[in-house]
Image: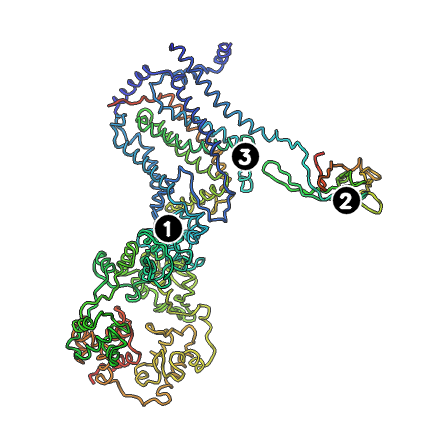
Amino acid sequence: MAPMDRRKFLSRATVAIAAAIGIGWAVPGVAYVLSPAKKKTGEAEWIVLGAADRVDIGTPSLFKAKVTKTSGWVSTEAEVAVYVVTHDGREFRGFSNVCTHLGCRVRWVADQNEFFCPCHNGVFSVDGQVVAGPPPRGLDEFPVKVEDGQIFVSLEA
Amino acid sequence: MSDRVGGWLDERTGWRLVWDGVFLRQVPKVNWAYTLGSATLIVVVNQIITGILLTIYYVPSVQDAYATVDFISHDLTAGWLIRGMHHWGASAMVLLVGLHMVRVIYHGAYKFPREITWLSGVGLLVLTLAFGFTGYLLPWDQKAYWATVVGTRMLEVTPLIGDWALRVARGGDDLSAVTLSRFYGIHVWVLPAILLLLVGLHLYLVVRNGISAPPKKGE
Amino acid sequence: MREQDRRDYLEKYQEDKKRGIPFFPNALFKDAIVSLLVFVALVVLSAVIGAELGDQANPSDDSFTPRPEWYFLWLFQLLKFFPGNLEFVGVIILPGAILLILAALPWLDRSRTRNIRGRPIVLGFVVFLFLGVLGLTVQALLAAEPPLEAAGGDPVALLYTENCSGCHGTSIAVPAGVNLGDVISQGGHEGMPAWSGDLSSDEIDALVGFVLSPNGSAVFQDSCSGCHQAVGLAATQPLTLRAALQPGSEFEPHAGLDLPSLDESSATALVNFLIAPDGHRLFVLNCAACHGNSAQFAGTRNELLAIIEKGGGHLTMPAMGGVLPDADIAALAAYVVAPDTAPASSAALFEADCAVCHGTRVPVAESVEAATEIIVKGGSHQTMPVWGDVLTAEQLDALTDYAYEASQGSPAVLGKTLFEQHCTVCHGEFGEGGASPVDPSFTIGPISTEQYLVTRDYITIRAIITQGQPDSGMSPFGLAFGGPLDADEVGAIVAYIRSWQDNPPVELPPAVERAPLLVDVADIYAGFCAQCHGADGEGGIGPSFQSPEWQAIHSDSQLFETIDLGHPATAMIGWGDILTDEQISGLVELIRSLQGGPGTPGPVAEVSFSGDVLPIFQSKCLACHGASGGWSAESYQSVMASGNSGPAVIPGDAENSLLGQWLLGTGTGGFMPPSGSLPTTEVDAILAWIRQGAPDN
């Protein structure tokens, strides 16, 4: 090998190795920094609420469940409350118990057959529609499914 | 093209002077043992890069330190690699610094005119150990905690100022949140600042005085 | 390096450079290759081994055995060679010196030679340093991990792991001559707590064994733990233990058991574990029964070792041939060989002639002839056991070290003297306390009760003596605080005070001390004194108050003092802390009224030498103190004049007469007769005779 060739080869090899090491740091480094962003909570997480036969036909029943929310290394526990309604025992719907007006908790008043918000007298029908009072829209609805007699709710919607 | 860009840059930065002085300088014929210094340097760079990456998620508090290290190691993409390389880099650093020193002693390379280079090297050795000691605590696991309890307690035997030295090292009587926070600050800000200064001086002197030639018989 | 050398070097370096290579790319290429290798190595290590993350730090879980990162291991290991006060040498001085030498290397090695062959000292230093660090690191890595897992089954190892390994790591190097049991129970140095509050003494014994013989613990676990618990077995009698370990044991409890057979080193380790080679403890177990706190010894350590190892023949039995009638000798010989079939009179003969030294113990002889021979000729007796067969080499060494040191004046003996000089003024001779000499209304509590000593460790007592107790009027005694005592002297006093703990001269808890009993004197007598002195003062464990002699020879103030402070050589304790002075005075009166008692003979005027004293000498002392030299008990003249230590009797002063001191055990030598104190009545008779002025009557 001529001296110049050898020199060229060594130069290129050295630069190539330096580049390789650089990439060796950069690729995992970038992936490491970006990885929390890529992690979309994505698929709906189904939370068990309880047995489906606890729900009387035509009467909303309140279910409460604990949800652990993890962000990074910090886990927080939250309680969700969902009214589950069915009219035929097959189709179930889940409603948030938070009033769409100012965030008070609504409760089911069986006598009136309606949801009532005590803060400003908001009234919702059994299917979550606004009946009276200041709420701007009906109660938020969550997807609900029943599997093996258990009701699951997804809070993603 | 690249010549034109280089020329344009050179007119404004004078980089060619530096390039010629640092990279195109003549050095004596050397053997493989002379690569130990640059091997150490690459580990230093590794420690800086991975260390910076670790600080992105690490939180130096008693509540969070362990959880964040756990998060880095198990939840983040390549987190295990970043932390692994930092962890093993620390060991490699000590090993390579030691070998590099043995090489320098073997070749008598600490002699004129390289005394200051040697002295800055000894400083870097101490610095390396200080990095190791402060960094060991940061994961806040049992091993880290108790090794540091014992490590700092050693200071207590110093005559006269033992008690005081112990409290200075721990920031109080016990190993606590204060200790963790201080060790973190030292490991991440104080020591790297000194490290950069000393490495800079060390490299400048290596370039200025040249790499020592392996002494022949009778030299 | 001289100017010329420097110029030469620079010139030569320029040449080297000219003949050299460009840094980029030729030299840098090699660097790049190595860098790549290092990088790949880091990635591979991370992928294959990874960075361990243990359990979260738990500051309250001190069972974790800390271990530094590998590059500090050598320093960690080095510390084991610098225990106690020397620790700072290992921590600060040695590493500091190494660093200093490294930093100063260019100025230490100033020769122009650069080739390593021309620099043997530097080469030697580096090789030494390298091998040293490497060796220590390897040693630390090899050091047996404390059996954390095994600890599940080995309770002693678990004890160690829980209580000791936090500071001491996997093992402790104990310097020779350290009383490890004391260090553990009382706390040794700064930072080491006293464990006696947390661990039972059985557990401490077991720990001592474990520290000194960790292998023994493992052997025990393998071979004995099926039936035995280590903490209960540790520190039993070595003779029993040795017998129990015999293969195919004739040791009764082991009969019929299939014992695991141990090789020699395992057996030794096991014995060392169960009875730790801890000199002080061995002495207490094996020697104190005959030798008391320390044995007098004037020779070298090796001589002492030989005596302990091989047994001693240092009591000489007087020849009885010619002294006793032949018939008596024959009867005795028969009795010695077979007590049951010997003539009836022989038992009485033995009692009279032999029991003084031999007690009730019947010396063993194989045949009547052999027994006769020994009795007639007397001579050396193997009275001291051959400990070399019983103890392991480690135990022998430890025991010899302790016994030798103790014979040179153990700290406790030195401490006694110092205590008498500095402390008795306020604390009384036995730490019983009393009214403060400065302020009589202030009572100084006893410092010799068990409760007091158990609740104060060495460090505390040392601090009290050194720094004083300003609030209680005690001035500091330590040199550093302006007192007269240096650290060693304070240590000796602490050792002396500590020696009370096993046998406290004051047996009452401090809590009771200032609550005088508000009952009348008669009830006090009936409740306390009568237990030993009889309901009517007829005597019992204590002397009879009815005896006119006894009443004659004790003054009122003596009685008062004895009740107040107790009597050192007897079971009589000091009542001064419980009773008021009035009550004691009342007791003295009551005791006086008991003289004569119901139905005792009238007062005897005085003790007669020929009638009362000489018969005691003849029956109890003459066997040894007759023809065989030294003090002779034969006659009035010999009693008064003979002896190797000056006159045995100082007429009128029983307590300071050698004879009195021997009988009471208040002198330096111990008790006479060696088989135990004479009955109180006999001692009192002899003392009374001396007090009368030792007349030849």
The answer to whether mark 3 and mark 2 are in CB contact below 8 A is: no
SS for callout 1? helix
Pointer 2: what residue?
A: A55
- For the residues labelled 2 and 1, the Cα–Cα distance comes to 68 Å
Using the image, name the chain to which the residue with label 1 belongs.
Answer: C
Quarter holding the C terminus of chain C? bottom left
Q: Do dots 3 and 2 share one subunit?
A: no
Residue C485 shows in the view:
no
Q: Is residue B49 above or below residue C191?
A: above
The residue type indicated by label 3 comes to: Ile
Taking depth in this image into account, of A63 and B154 the one nearest to the observer is A63
Residue at (60, 39) in percent of width and height: A74
Quarter holding the N terminus of chain C? top left
Q: Is residue C655 above or below residue C482?
A: below
Residue C159 image position (x, y, % from top left): 43, 53
Using the image, name the chain to which the residue with label 2 belongs.
Answer: A
SS for callout 3? helix
Q: Do dots 1 and 3 share one subunit?
A: no
Pointer 1: what residue?
A: C214
- For the residues labelled 3 and 2, the Cα–Cα distance comes to 44 Å
The residue type indicated by label 2 comes to: Val
Using the image, name the chain to which the residue with label 3 belongs.
Answer: B
- For the residues labelled 1 and 3, the Cα–Cα distance comes to 41 Å
The residue type indicated by label 1 comes to: Pro
Residue at (34, 82) in percent of width and height: C544
Q: Is residue C600 above or below residue C448?
A: below
Residue B72, numbered label: 3
Residue C494 image position (x, y, % from top left): 35, 60
Question: Dot 3, crowdedness within 10 Å: few (<14), some or many (≥20)?
Answer: many
- Mark in the foreground, 2 or 1: 2
Question: Dot 2, crowdedness within 10 Å: few (<14), some or many (≥20)?
Answer: many
Quadrant in the rendering for residue C423: bottom left
